[in-house]
Image: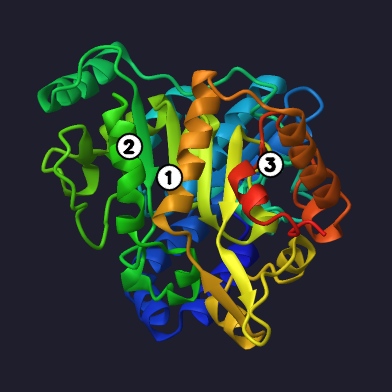
Amino acid sequence: MQPIIKMKQTILHIRKGGWPVLISTLIKLPYRLVLIIVDFLALPISIPIIILIRIFKPIYHIRFGYFYGGRIGHFVFDTAMAAIIKRNNSEGAYLFYFLPNISNQHWSKMVKRELNVFYWVRLLDFANSIIPGGEDHSIIPGLNQAYASRDINGLIYHSDFSFTFTNNETESVKKWLHAKGWNEGEKIICFHIRDNEYLSTKNWRYHNYRNSDVKTYIPAMELLANKGYWVMRMGKKMHEPIKSSHTKIIDFPFDKNRNDLIDIWLCANCELMVTTGSGPDAISDVYRRPILHLNYLPITDLHSWSNSHFYPKKLYWKESGLLLSFEEYCQNNFFRSENYEYFGINIVDLNSKEITDSVLEKIKIIEGKYILSVEDNQLQNNFWDTALKTKKFSEFNEFIHPDAGISLSFLRSNPNWLN
């Protein structure tokens, strides 16, 4: 891995997270120092190997890359993109290693079945990074690229690749589902509602604008359960359990038999992922499952490469009480809660009715029961025409999935938003 990139990333995290992140970094420092010492001790062996690799590049091109597994979203997305790129360009060898701290151990196991992931690659990558001219042998993950794990070229859409589950893994998950009362063939809808418990120990409060109250989603969950769907509330850590007695609503974070395999499998095989925009939805994304992003900010960051609809949080000017226009949403595309406060913007979450209306709209589209009218098509076309003419939006969204779009219920409720 490039040492300078890692150093800059660590400094950025400390600046954003403050004292708790600094303390956490210092606690991990001894282990990281051991890794660095090993990197240097291996140089007498790794440097000659790198020199040979560069000499033989015209005959056989070897590349080195790494994955940060500490955040499931980046971990899933970057590994999937690497696997697709490897399949599209099979010449030479692609060698990878994992950075410490893996958020989902089962995903790492699935990745290793497809990609060449070994610890010793770290030693070669380190040697390659300190000898000038090694760029052609280095693979930078999406996390550290300009667009930060975004599929701006539509590689996922144009590929049929996905990491596979073994028969034993699938049967294991189905056994867990059967114990809940699930029957073969019944469809599953996942909800991932980010709340204040997310990264609470790492001082990510500046991301609180992305959190939502799960209670506002319960009417939509119960509506889907009454329609025969199994509803899974996903996540490893959540602030509070769901207060619903419906037998088809499973609160996965509080299930005593929860494990990493079930976590991955459900998100990969659901009929729909309803999300506020957080790590687990990347699983549904790379498995090409329909996604509904609710309470999503900033609007410029939407996943235009996916089969996804979006209903953003509502932003109002404090002084006038007016809803920001689409262009103003793009101009104020902040990734920190305090910036919205500084510029006089109130953030208002969706209410239960808005959430339910949007969920019902998306599920009808999936079921083939939603017939788009001429007016609907015009609304969606107006959104994309306006969005792609807006620089702050278009530079992050080059490839547009044919089924991606803004929630029509949002556009109808705010007819002047695009003007």
Secondary element type, mark 2: helix
Q: How many marks?
A: 3
Residue 409 in the image: state x and y as whole percent. 59, 45
Q: Residue at x 19, y 40 (%)?
A: 258
Tell whether 63 sits left or right of 220: right
Looking at numbered disc 2 in the image, what kind of residue is underneath it?
Leu
Q: How is the image coloured?
A: rainbow
Q: Secondary structure at mark 1?
A: helix
Q: Is residue 193 above or below residue 137?
A: below
Q: Position of residue 215 (x, y in %)?
A: 30, 57
Residue in the foreground of this view, choosing between 112 and 146: 146
State the mark number for residue 223: 2
Report x, y in % for residue 76.
48, 40
Find the distance from the CA under tag 3 to the CA under tag 2: 27 Å
Question: Which residue position is annotated with label 3?
Answer: 304
Q: Amino acid type of disc 1? A: Thr
Residue type at tag 3: Ser
Q: Nearer the viewer, mark 3 or mark 2?
A: 2
Where is mark 1, residue-wise?
356
Asked if labels 2 and 1 touch by Cβ distance under 8 angstroms, the answer is: yes
Q: Position of residue 50 (x, y in %)?
A: 66, 42
Alpha carbons under labels 1 and 2: distance apart: 8 Å
**Left or right of 96 in this view: 156:** right
